[in-house]
Image: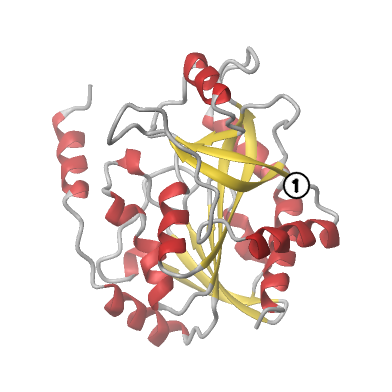
Amino acid sequence: MPDAASWQSKQQRRMMTKFDVKRMANDIITRTGFKGNTAIVLGSGLGDFAENFDNPTVVPYASVNGYPKPTVEGHAGEFVFGDLNGIPVMVAKGRFHYYEGYPLSVVTLPIHLFSELGIKYLIITNAAGSMKKEFPPGDLMLITRHMDCTFREKMADPKWIDRPPYYQPEVLQAVRNASEKSGVKIVEGGYCWTQGPAYETPDEIHYYLSIKGTAVGMSTVPEIETAGDTGIHVVGISCLTNYAAGITDQPLTHHEVMETADRVKSDFAELIKEIITQFGAWK
């Protein structure tokens, strides 16, 4: 049970529902001069990707008036702007999770900010647990459909979402093309969004497997849906950092998540760079 201070902090975060996104965007443009149309959200342990930028400019979340700060290990809480193979890109190093006590208006705030900044192409990444033994930790998974398994609204079996504007054939094909050109293998599957913050139980994983889930995690779905609804071409990439509970007899730890993400960061960077190149060819 949370103590009084942590409960109060969570309640305060849940009340943070109104933002001046236009003001935030103007502040960022004034400080960076950013004119790109491509953005990336980096999940747990994947923040090193921004080291690939030429002429990087770092803008801490805390320095953007009214912008929240993430509280989870592995989420730095900063924007990085720079050039990648000549293409201007912005990166969000750190996201906001529903389990942190934030309402969905905060969880999806980065997407609304991207939209205000003129972003047309968005790559959303995460660290996720694999529910299939044939997809071991270290694999990169293209999300081809998702399911809301938070049961926030009703207890009925959730439904798969695999249609435009969230999943567009040309966007998915661009990732497949990027995999082939970069030589970085990807697998494909369905992502189950759970509420967290605790890892899932073996019984829960058995249930997700029964409804054809491939990977499980605590983010990404609200961001994908918001991006699609605002007209952004969006793609989700999961770094499978561990087996989900009950798939093996090994305990689940956040250390394993971070360690696996670090091990695959080179392949991850090559794949993301090639995806951005594919999107750049659409201009």
Residue 55 visible somewhere in the drawing? no
Q: Nearer the viewer, residue 78 or 238?
A: 238
Q: How many marks?
A: 1
Residue at the image point whose x is 35% and y is 27% from the top? 156
In the depicted structure, whether residue 119 falls above or below residue 170: below
Is residue 56 found left or right of 28 in the rendered image?
Answer: right
Is residue 248 found left or right of 72 in the rendered image?
Answer: right
Residue at the image point whose x is 65% and y is 83% from the top? 283
In the depicted structure, whether residue 172 falls above or below residue 7: below
Element at label 1: loop
Q: Nearer the viewer, residue 76 or 144?
A: 144
Label 1 neighbourhood size at 10 Å, few (<14), some (14-19), many (20+)? many
Is residue 68 found left or right of 227 in the rendered image?
Answer: left
Name the amino acid, label 1: Ile
Residue 170 sits in quarter: bottom right
Residue 165 visible somewhere in the drawing? yes
Percent across and percent down for residue 213 are: 58, 31
Image quarter (top left, top right, bottom left or bottom right) of the N terminus: top left
Residue at the image point whose x is 34% and y is 61% from the top? 109
Q: State the colouring used for the structure image.
A: secondary structure
Percent across and percent down for residue 169 are: 65, 60
In the depicted structure, whether residue 22 falls above or below residue 131: below
Percent across and percent down for residue 33 are: 47, 87
Q: Nearer the viewer, residue 103 or 170?
A: 170
Q: Which residue is mark 1?
A: 186
Q: Nearer the viewer, residue 18 or 283?
A: 283
Percent across and percent down for residue 238 are: 61, 45
